[in-house]
Amino acid sequence: MSTSRLIYGLSALGILVSSCSKPVQQQEEGVAVEQSLVKPFYVTDSVIHDTDDPAIWVHPSDPSKSLIIGTDKDAEGALYVFDLKGNVIDSLIVRGIQRPNNVDVGYGLDLGDRTVDFAVTGERMTSKLRFFSLPDMKEINAGGIEVYEGESGADFRDLMGVALFQDKTTGKNYVIAGRKNGPTDGTYLWQYEILGQNGQISLKEVRKFGSYSGKKEIEAIAVDAELGYIYYSDEGVGVKKYYADPEKGNEELAFFAQEGFSDDHEGISIYKLDDTTGYILVSDQGSNLFHVFPREGSASNPHDHSLITKIATSTISSDGSESISLALGPDFPHGLFVAMSDDKTFQIYRWEDMAGDILKSKN
């Protein structure tokens, strides 16, 4: 029996009535900290090599049939697809991707001959972005599309982080690409407009942006489409914030989460209570904690993201994660949180278990 089915079975028997015990709050420098270990509602089937990052595709008519897409990071890597109980869907696995790190999901991309939802992952060893239509996981451009063209130095072309942004005003779609190493002159991240024609995708470079400390790398990237911001982890240093719209310039709007992390700043995800409020969750990889910050900032400053709480989970050295506040069937009435764990799985949490007594849930 798979781990996911085992956890579900125990829940059905009433043995696992709640995924976590009642939270115990402890004040840490004025911040309420969840001390109970939050446990997942489901754990996915294992991948072969090394999980790294998940994304969630929402089914348009039946949210309970939504999918989790996750990377298996290896030179002979893959994209895995799971149902919301963590069961792998073998027919949708895409194998033969050369070290995929991050994955993201987009909706309503006009390809000229059709409109598709899609997943994108970075193929690190070829410096290519690979695009797949959803939910069938068929590749749109065979072999992918190269990025960082003209960049010198192999280590500056080592593609890792990817995130998608659909501008709600213009309808334009963009992909932001991060890498293992890059310059410290504010051009670490490259942003491309995604263009569709005759059933294929082309990429138009629109800007290079993003300050870099030079300490480790920039991999985790998250986009808040409604508010129009990009967040990324400058690992070992903090989280930085920029406008997502390239027309608004390259000013660094915020630099937060600089203290209280034991190791790398990793996966970033956003839980949206409504169009303007919610939470930003950042993985403290070395402590198996997720630090939570206000999405809307403070009352006086939208770019003041002060720590709200820290959540301890059963993930091991978590890298990538994703949050969603939409109701996804009876198991996840307030949405879910899914995070990579360093045991070849992804752990799937009910949002209300993550929220405990400190955070809110979307009704």
Image (spheres, rainbow, N blue to C red):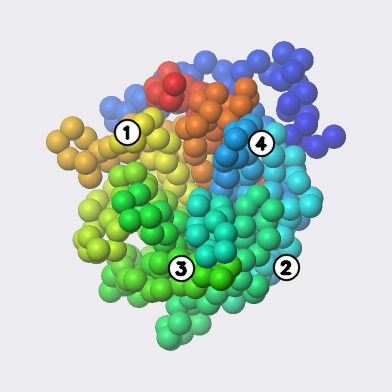
Q: Is residue 219 visible?
A: no
Residue located 28% across and 56% down the image: 243
Residue bearing mark 1: 277
Q: Is residue 212 above or below residue 8?
A: below
Indicate which disc, 4 or 3, sits on the residue closer to the N terminus.
4
Q: Which mark is residue 65?
A: 4
Indicate which disc, 2 or 1, sits on the residue closer to the N terminus.
2
Q: Could you say whether the residue bearing mark 4 is in a helix, strand or loop?
A: helix
Q: Residues within 10 Å of mark 3 (few under 14, many from 20)?
A: some
Question: Extreme top residue here?
Answer: 14
Q: Could you say whether the residue bearing mark 3 is in a helix, strand or loop?
A: strand
Q: Could you say whether the residue bearing mark 1 is in a helix, strand or loop?
A: loop
The reply, left or right, for residue 330 in relation to residue 255 is right
Q: Which mark is residue 96?
A: 2
Question: Extreme right residue here?
Answer: 1
Question: In x, y percent, where is residue 109?
Answer: 50, 57
Dot 2 amino acid type: Gly
Q: Is residue 74 above or below residue 343?
A: below
Indicate which disc, 1 or 4, sits on the residue closer to the N terminus.
4
Residue bearing mark 3: 195
Per the model, the C-alpha gap separating discs 2 and 1 is 40 Å
Residue located 62% across and 57% down the image: 133
Q: Nearer the viewer, residue 195 or 359?
A: 195
Dot 1 amino acid type: Thr
Q: Nearer the observer, disc 1 or disc 3?
A: 3
